[in-house]
Image (cartoon, helix red, strand yellow):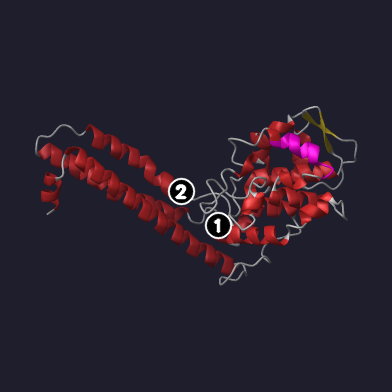
Amino acid sequence: MLQAFVMAVTGPMFLAVFVAYAVTVTWALRRWSRREYAVQDHKAAGAAGSSVAGVHLEGLNRQDPFEVAYLTDGARGVLRAALASLMDKGLLRISGDKLVRGEAERNNLHSVENAVYVRAQNEEAKSILGNKELKEAMDSHMADTKERLTRLGLMYGESGLGPVMLHVVAGWVLVEGLVVWRLWFAAEHGHHNVGFIILLGLAFLFVVPMALNIPNGPTARGKKVIEDLQVSLESWKDRLAAKHDTSPNDWALAAGLFGLAALAGTEHAAMASAMRQGNTSGSSGCSGGSSCSSSCSSSCSSVGSCGGGGCGGGGCGGGGGD
């Protein structure tokens, strides 16, 4: 029956059937892979003491603005939070278009604040959030935090790598197996126009693992936590603007959770605006992705909080780049 089908479907028609088949297999394995990872997330969260029935905030250390920022937008979120805190402490200010150190004493800094303080001197404000060295430093300093958030089921980690590799192998067997069969059939019947099927086979060797790779940033549970935090702390932006009993941690939390636009109308608005100028197009400020929440429409332009491609798909169009 299969041989009769292959004989009946030849040329461009077979290529179309092959692409449809390969895409369907890849999509199905991707869904399966994500579902398997979601199950692992629930198990991890249960082992960490969080409710599997619903997402709660108690697993997240809300007293640590850098942990919240890392969950929200990865290294970029932590960098925003550190910059906001250092601004409020008087340790960083803007001079022209560059960041320079302030005159305040450098006491009791968090490790990420210290890393930013050391490296930010004379950096252009508009490019600071895209500084690769700084973002790598943020990831390094937050490694333990990421591990904890992964155990809580709030961030993707390496625990799903094994199952994903099994799905990749399954995809290769199912897709490339058809390619091998087609090439064997062509050789048996003296057909030599197999260039396109070879190219498609090679292409799907890369497409399958790319489609099934473990995503970065928060899991669905993590996105829900960020959504809850954004809703519950929305009023903090007004509090900062009113300068009402604020601390450096408050500024760090606001910048990490809502983005630099949360500083609009505050005493640090000019510096935040300077840093946003170079990050309003083409950069994925939402790469760590937090949530496409009800507040996404109001804050995604400022928050790097919505992951890569549009609300509902894990992002808000790049998140405004701050």
- The residue positioned 28% from the left and 49% from the top of the image is 21
Is any part of residue 81 visible from this angle?
Answer: yes
Q: Position of residue 98 (x, y in %)?
A: 77, 29
- In the image, 188 versus 229, the foreground residue is 229
How many residues crowd around disc 1 within 10 Å: few (fewer than 14), some, or many (20 or more)? Answer: many
Q: Quadrant of residue 10?
A: top left
Query: From the viewer's perspective, is the residue at label 2 or at label 1 nearer?
Result: 1
Magenta span: predominant SS is helix
Check disc 2 and give the amino acid type: Asn
Residue beneath label 1, please? 219
Q: In this view, does 306 lie above or below 203?
A: below
Q: Is residue 308 left or right of residue 79?
A: left
Residue beneath label 2, please? 213
> Which residues fall within the magenta stretch?
266-276
- The residue positioned 57% from the left and 69% from the top of the image is 46
Q: In this view, does 231 lie above or below 178?
A: below
How many residues crowd around disc 2 within 10 Å: few (fewer than 14), some, or many (20 or more)? Answer: some
Q: Is residue 93 above or below residue 214?
A: above
Q: What element carries label 1?
A: loop
- In the image, 207 versus 234, the foreground residue is 234
